[in-house]
Amino acid sequence: MSVTARHLTARNPDLDSDGAAIGVMARALGTPLMPWQQQVVDVATEHHPTQPGAWRYPIVVLTIPRQSGKTTLLRALMAQRALMTDGLQAFYTAQTGKDARVRWRELVSAVDTGRRSQGSEALTFATSGGTVAPFAPTPKSLHGYTPNLVCIDEAFSFDATQGADLMGAVVPAQQTLIDRQLWIVS
């Protein structure tokens, strides 16, 4: 069954988008995007019309039913960005640090590279130096990092205090970057 998104911001065809490249990455990872996923990345990765290097949407909020492919979409997004952008730092979290590491390991297995030692987990692409790493959803988790891309998966699992603490970790860490993007997915 081929399902498209029911409610989605319209794509601006006048703007460049990284959606096609993310679709290519998803196929390379062995998980081609479903039509709704392709729609989402086509819109969410539109380039800003007047700020070179910036995204039209610095914050992307995506809500979809369970088991619909959100983590698969995020894996392709993170891998494409890290492979294609020199020195990019992408970070991923979920309801717990353990859950984030499990999902990160799925990406590492699909790419078949990366470091897996406890405490220094990072998937690094040799051609770009871009990295994808899991992080625990804590207030101090991104201290010392400047992540271009942060993906918060299973956002429903955080209460108001935990959500505020997590945003308190992410927003300052990205503040100085023009090419920052935060994906909040649930």
Image (cartoon, rainbow, N blue to C red):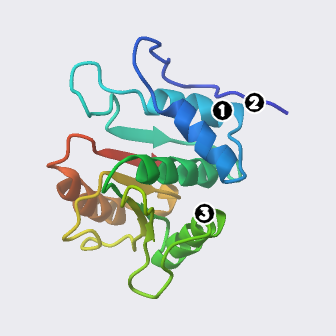
Earlier along the polypeptide chain: callout 1 or callout 3?
A: 1
Q: State the residue in front, 44 or 155.
A: 44
- Which residue shows up at 80% across the image and 30% down it? 2
Residue bearing mark 2: 3
Q: State the residue in front, 158 or 140.
A: 140
Residue bearing mark 1: 36
**185 relative to 47 in the view: left or right:** right
- As shown in the figure, which amino acid type bears the numbered disc 1? Trp
Res. 65 visible in picture: no
Mark 1 and mark 3 in contact? Answer it, CB < 8 Å: no
Residue 78 pos. (x, y %): 47, 53
**Which numbered circle lies on residue 20?**
none
**8 relative to 16 in the view: left or right:** right
| SS state under label 2 | loop
- As shown in the figure, which amino acid type bears the numbered disc 2? Val
Residue 29 pos. (x, y %): 66, 54
- Which residue shows up at 68% across the image and 45% down it? 27
Mark 1 and mark 2 in contact? Answer it, CB < 8 Å: yes
Residue 97 pos. (x, y %): 46, 76
- Which residue shows up at 29% across the image and 73% down it? 141
Q: Mark 3, mark 2: which one is toward the viewer?
A: 3
**Which numbered circle lies on residue 111?**
3
Earlier along the polypeptide chain: callout 3 or callout 2?
A: 2
| SS state under label 1 | helix
- Which residue shows up at 27% across the image and 65% down it? 165
Relative vertical location of residue 21 with respect to residue 93 in this rendering, above or below: above
Q: State the residue in front, 7 or 160.
A: 7
| SS state under label 3 | helix
Res. 22 visible in picture: yes
What crowding class fits label 2: few (fewer than 14 Cα within 10 Å), some (14-19), or many (20 or more)?
A: few
